[in-house]
Amino acid sequence: VLLEWLLVITALALGVWLLGLRDRYAALLLTSMTLAGAALAVATSSEQKPPTPRPLRGGSEAFATSSACRKCHAAEYASWHDSYHRRMTQTAELAAVAAPDLRQGGRLRVETSGRTVELFARQGQLWARLPDPSVTSAVPGEAYETSFQTAPIRDVPVQLLTGSHQHQAFWVAGARAGELRIVPVVYQIKEGSLIARRDAFLNPPDAPEQAVRWNSNCVQCHAVAGQPAHDEASDAFATSAAELGIACEACHGAGAEHVRAMQNPLTRYAARAGAKTGPPLVNPKNLASERASQVCGRCHSYFFPKQEADWWQHGFAKSYAPGDDLGKAQLLLSREVLAGPDAPHLAASADSLFYRDGTIRVGGREYNGLVRSACFERGQGDKKLSCLSCHSLHQGAPDDQLDPEKLGNQACAQCHARTASDLSAHTHHAASSPGSLCYNCHMPHVSYALLGAIRSHRVDSPAFDPGSDRPNACNLCHLEQTEAWAKAQVARWYGPRADPTLESLRTPDEAPAGARFALAGDAAVRAITAAALGRHESSHDAPALRIQLLGQLMQDDYAAVRTIAERSRRSLLPTTDAAPLTPALVARLLDARDRRPITIAE
Amino acid sequence: MTESERPPFNLRAGFWALFGFATLGLVLEAMHGFKLGFYLNVDNETRRLLWRLAHAHGALLGLINVAYALTARAWPALEDRLAGRALACALLLMPLGFLLGGAFAEGADPGLSVGLAAAGGVALLFGLGRVAWKAH
């Protein structure tokens, strides 16, 4: 600042000398110039604010950060900049806050576990008023809720934000040094409302509130090269990340050396001419499809670190880099692994995470589904299914990042060209109808995430395995039909040999499949059915059945099921038709409800 | 060269400015070539903008000073001592304001010295206005 003032005064003195002050016009000019200069300086100068507290110490020297990448890769930077990946973790400046009310200086509050939690802006920073997190996070997890109900209320600055697409979560300093703990509220971006965190996820109604910790739960995937750096002796964290959010180097690997090499223009032109010019960055497009999918699968999977002690220090920053074999760093979880003798201890049960047939039902864990798809298991070389078979991170629209050249049936048609050329012969639905979109039958909405149902990424054919608790694709559209009807249709069209499980079907049930899913299914199935009741893809919409089922689901024990049912209810058309299910049938299905506690809290 | 043979101040200042700010252009190009972070990184967007403005305004004001000096020689009635000084003053302050404002930029805000650019702007308008008035 001193140097700047010195230079300004010198420049002004020179200006005055140049101008001279020989007449009144010169004096007038000098006064005008001084006033204009001072006005511009004041208008553009930044308010001197104390720096925002940052939980991160800075990342590894090997990483250059996205800012450096933009110097050469402006288009890729721009497409990434528009993505939700970039905004997955942000510091809590008001500009990054999703709630317009908070950005404009308002307040949002919500009741949770008997206490009021409030968010508000103060001096350009987001703050939270809540039971003192330095008290509530000092106790063991099982005592958190009791502590939360008795701790004194305190105002604390919010340090980080997670999410910018569906939900936004908020993080404040915890009891341990360097620790960040969640504020137990979630802002629903599309609805524009603040809700209790326990209601934003699929939690049994009697499940205690959890004090989630950013340093161990989130840093591994919501930042580049996140390292928990937990010191066991002092129980303190010195957590670091190369960059917040999922940035360039999360997929392309550490880039500092590449940036250094490419600063030399001669090196760049040599590289353009095809010369080998030092360490190349990884481009997942150029990897074998299995390794390319692992780049995404590093985070989009349900996994456990193979070297747990190392993970508490370095996360996956040292054990995995894009292009490596992911299996060396991570144990991919499945029902079989969780049933084994060396199964890691998880907060959620295997029943919560997987259907009985082994299909993952947690959204955001698509890699677990992908690797159990026939197109992945049987595909070879370029024909092996990978994430990039459908997605393009730099070309796709931010919502799903689907490759614009592979929308609709085009992704499947890359291999299944003959089927795609005579679609109706295969689908037995009109070619332009939702029933002729490959993914509606082979990737139905049977995964649960963020108060909604998303497509399963286990690409398979509709099955009617009597042991499975996974809703079948046919009846997720044809909710008013029975599963026996769907089974018979599939058998007539494709023959019983098309699916060996068709030989051993369950006893036909007279209840519509939608009723069985909605009333007798477990909590995740009920949530998924509540979402299906809000989609209207079948030509037989059955509005009276939908109203009756959503009426039941809006009284569900699980808050998440009620929320989804409420949303779906808004999409229904009014009808005067009587409720089609008899009270006796409803009671019988409710008696048969699968009451295993289900937790999908991410 | 005697004092009377010496070219007018605005002509000399204008050509030196053209030389200086053309050199600055070359330096900016080189910084692009070598992908220097303090000029090209996203966090330094403001600096990049202000230094480009310094280059452009410096070169343009150099040409204006040259044009004024030649005009005054061709039409002595248009010579105005105060206007000439104001144009020279603008030539100093305006690009310097952008240059220093960029050098001391923090985030999206330029340094306080960007105020010099506004002061130079007033001097430029004053100088141009006086010459235009005389030519009217």
Image: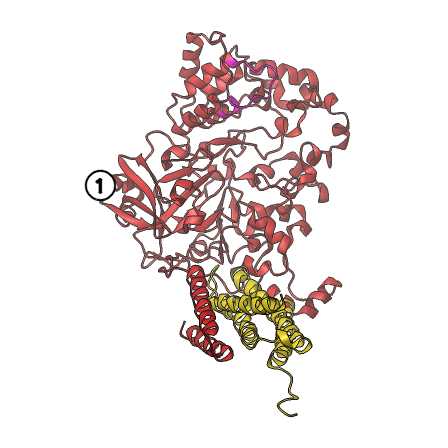
Chain colours: A red, B yellow
Is B125 covered by the magenta stretch? no
User: Relative to the observer, which residue lies in front, A101 or B36?
Assistant: A101
Residues in magenta? A531-543
User: Relative to the observer, which residue lies in front, B50 or A332?
Assistant: B50
Q: Is residue A599 left or right of residue A251?
A: left
- Tell me where residue A314 appears, x and y as whole percent: 46, 57
- Residue for point 67% across, 51% down: A287
Q: Name the residue beneath numbered marker 1.
A: A150
Residue type of the residue flagged with mark 1 = Thr
Chain bearing mark 1: A
Question: Quadrant location of residue A399?
Answer: top right
Q: Is residue B8 left or right of residue A361?
A: right
Q: Is residue A132 left or right of residue A95?
A: left
User: Relative to the observer, which residue lies in front, A406 or B66?
Assistant: B66
| Residue at the extreme bottom of the image, as rendered | B2
Can residue A396 be seen here? The reply is yes
